[in-house]
Image (tube, helix red, strand yellow):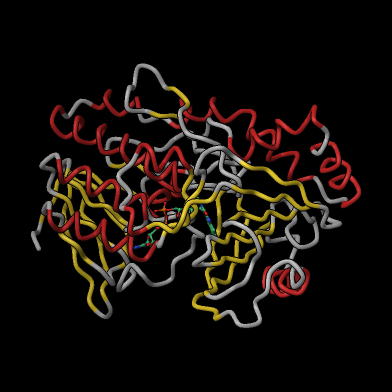
Amino acid sequence: MKASYDVTIIGAGLAGLQCARLLSRQGVNVLLVDRKNTLDQKIHTTGIFVRRTLVDFDIPDDCLGPAIKHVTLYSPALRPLELVSQHDEFRIGRMGQLYQRYLQQCLHSGVDWLPQTSYLSHSVANGKITLRLNSGSSTRSITTRYLIGADGARSRVARDLKLEVNREWIVGIESVFQGAVLDGPPRLLCFLDPKLAPGYIAWIAHDGEETHLGVGGYPSLFDPMVALQDFRSRVANIIDLRKAKQIEARAGLIPVGGVLRNIANSNGLLTGDAAGAVSPLTAGGLDPCMRLSAFAASVVTEYLSTSDVEVLQAYSGELFRSRFASRLWARRIAATLRHSQLIELGCALLRLPLFSRLGHHVFFGRGSFPDVTDRSQLTIVSKAFPH
Ligand SMILES: Cc1cc2nc3c(=O)[nH]c(=O)nc-3n(C[C@H](O)[C@H](O)[C@H](O)COP(=O)(O)OP(=O)(O)OC[C@H]3O[C@@H](n4cnc5c(N)ncnc54)[C@H](O)[C@@H]3O)c2cc1C
């Protein structure tokens, strides 16, 4: 452990790990801090990666389950709509393994790793940031030139840096099984039902090896634990869990207000859920983690070498946010859809040839988080995520 670092990253989820890997490869002196003891604990994502992420990033094959091409969308009355892609669209990440692998890569390229340590606060004097970190009973101070908040949906770093904070969430909760029996190929099953999942969906993600069964929605509108139990009973005729073994329970908040506007200043920046970088429509956050963190690493590297604050202006949520206008509208509509009959009607329309392309577009279409490797031209390259 050194007493001083170029960059300290709080949070070793996908966003923090991606940032740490890329910064350290540029020769930046990085400290990575997480309150978790090991990264395969308390995972709070289903871990579904979309095709575009798999194509654009180096996610190790052995940290991913079998490919999925089939999606079934169920109406509240459980009428199915089958959607099949020509491509391998999704793969469920083995997230504990992936986090550990990325951490190994970080350590290999010189990142200092501080597990079981919570960020408490920071102060700024003479261009240096002093962090207060707590490990168990002891509190220590570390100085850093720049601070990155990759500390999730309720970011303490965002608050302390006086950047914007998330204000709108849905909550997601799921059980992970091995040995579930579901006829047919690996598939995602998405259930629209305003009682089980108000403002979002219930899902079964089954890749033949692992099965994730979950519900999500606005926390003020349902009891997630009760909804998950009800959902499990409701789908007893669709998936056979009688001999399945539950291997994990996962849960977490998902910010759905869109990427925040003010996510960087001369002391630090935000990435991943801390920056609100989640698709407001589909609530997919893994692709944004990879893309925004790659961009953050490039901006921070340049800022450290030039000390030019104008470099940070490129890292503005405003630029990304304009790309999300239609998805923010779709989120507003989803938030108000409380009537099963209306959703049933919408699902019936999706079965008509005229509207079926919309279903394909939402599940298999392109265009989620802007690709920001070329800063002069923010282009949309990733795809919509189904849940
Ligand atoms: C139930 C659920 C299912 C989901 N499924 C999908 C999916 O299938 N596909 C998809 O694309 N997206 C999905 N999402 C969204 C996606 O998982 C998130 O957007 C993504 O994981 C966010 O990663 P992150 O690194 O920004 O934050 P996190 O993974 O939340 O990491 C933040 C880290 O910061 C640490 N931390 C926080 N505060 C402190 C502190 N004070 N001191 C030290 N450490 C701290 C935490 O311990 C944590 O390790 C899902 C979300 C939920 C809740």
Rendered view: 34 above or below 317: below
Q: Residue at x 47, y 56 (%)?
A: 92
User: Hey, which residue is sitting farthest front in the picture?
Assistant: 184
Q: Nearer the viewer, residue 173 or 302?
A: 173
Q: Residue 281's x, y, as percent?
A: 63, 41
> Is 161 situated left or right of 171 in this image?
left
Q: From the viewer's perspective, is 214 left or right of 147? A: right
- Horizontal and vertical percent for residue 271? 38, 44
Question: Which image quarter: residue 327?
Answer: top right
Q: How many marks?
A: 0
Left or right of 201? Residue 298 is left
Identify which residue, 120 or 219, lies in the foreground: 219
Instruction: State the residue lying farthest toward the right.
Output: 341
Q: Front-most of 151 and 343? A: 343
Give the residue drawn at x 45%, y 32%.
317
Quadrant position of residue 246: bottom right
Q: Residue at x 51, y 39 (%)?
A: 87
Residue 357 in picture, x, y percent from top left: 70, 30
- Left or right: where 367 falls relative to 264: right
